Amino acid sequence: MATRTFDENKLMSKVKWKIVPYIMFLYVIAMVDRVNIGFAALQMNKDLGISATAFGLLAGIFFIAYFFFEVPSNVIMHKVGARIWVARILITWGIVTIATGFVQSITHIGIMRFLLGAAEAGFHPCMILYLTFWFPAKHLAKAVSLYICGMAIANIIVGPVSAWIMDNVAWYGLVGWRWMFILEGIPAVIMGIVTLFVMTDRPEQAKFLTPEEKNWLVAELKKEHEIKAAKLKTSKWAVFGNFRVWHISWVHICMVLAMYGLGMWMPQILRELSKLLTNTQIGLVSTLPYICGVIAMVSIAKHSDKTGERRWHVALPIFVSFFGLLALTMTSNLWLAVFFLCITMAGFYGFIGTFWTLPHMILSEGSAAVGIAIISSVGNLGGFFGPYFVGFLKDFTGSTNAGMYVLASFALLCTVAVLAFPKNPAAQTTKSVSS
């Protein structure tokens, strides 16, 4: 192994700022096109006669397609490389988003949401896997949290931008919500083409690293993967029988159900709290919880990397969200509700940044492509159930409060499941495999 003649932290900072901002930007685009239906609903539901239950179904059907296509997508990415496969994902979901602007019925919306999920399937687990190709374990949480900042940044952007388009753009006889889909789908197609030219698959191919830096990073990652592979002894497809993979999947589905159940309905919750707010004002107010989310996510992940502790850094934030969701049902004051939304989203995002270090603790590189995809795809089924539960209960009770109680219960289940995760899962996994 080459002698290290450079500072490790400086090298990883160099890699971080070269790799993470670009994929974070792609994640912003992904999330905008995934969640903008929540703002489209402010106009679209009336235009197409969509009930609360139907909207919950339409918002969540994206994740059904995501579930079925995510594992094969991640396996293909591991074979062909991130550059080619991520470019394909971006271009196809951009085309589907643009086409959504021309739908004429509830059925059409359902079809396009399903196709969007199929097109985008694999993007997020591909990016998590991609980061493990570049960052050793002790640097991973911060890198993942910065990448996932794209989720919060997207939610900060999508409200004001989508609402402004709906209020101000009505070209060629198309109403605002249609133009919102068309205009917000175009960046994905453009960046898909750009990705073909700018993304680097592995450190071995990195032109921005010196030979010494490249050799050290490749050797460090190889050593780490070999140690885990020797301990875990789990093949690519054997992860389907790994109890801890399904344990983490349950943790993920509980959190996603609660987060998307709230996020998809937030614009309509804000509208109910104040009928005087315009679409643009709702979009602006909705940015505040996500700003708090970014701050919480980066701070918690940084502290988790510093201490090396993962479990409590994942469990405590989602426990905070449990209380935030309950508190949200106890007020009809707009600004107090926004305060509780800020607390809740800070908990969700504080959870996410460190959560994705848990699979890295139990999966070697050979099994990570399938394992991470299983966790992501199963977990993202919560994105179907959360919005649907809230919509169904709103039609049944006339209020979103019952839905918030359901979301809170899943946040509590998530907390318990995280605390049940062992401190040294690799040791237990090894024991179960060898027995």
Image (tube, rainbow, N blue to C red):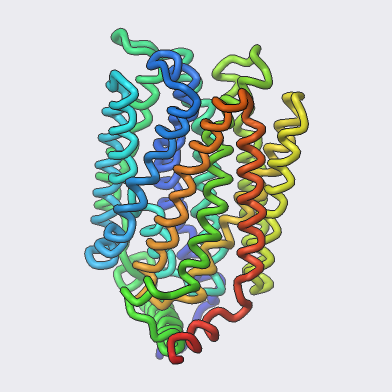
Work out whether residue 432 or residue 92 is closer to the camera in this orientation and state it: 432
Q: Which quadrant would the N terminus be assigned to in this image?
A: bottom left
Quarter of the rendering occupied by the C terminus = bottom left
At a point 34% along the width and 43% down the height, the residue shown is: 117
Frontmost residue, 302 versus 272: 272
Residue reaching furthest to the front:
396
Residue 224: x and y, percent?
Answer: 45, 82
- In the shown orientation, is residue 81 left or right of residue 434? left
Q: Nearer the viewer, residue 291 or 193?
A: 291
Taking the spot 45% from the left edge, 43% from the top edge, the residue there is: 384
Q: Looking at the picture, does residue 226 appear above or below residue 417?
A: below
Q: Could one spot residue 88 in this view of the protein?
A: yes
Report x, y in % for residue 333: 76, 24
Camera-side residue of 276 and 48: 48
Seen at 66% across and 46% down, the residue is: 408
* Residue 283 seen anywhere in this rendered image of the structure: no
Query: In the displayed structure, would residue 288 be above or below residue 89?
Result: above
Q: How many marks?
A: 0
Q: Residue 138's spot in the image, x, y percent?
A: 56, 74
Which residue: 72% across, 51% down?
A: 320
Q: Is residue 305 above or below residue 224?
A: above
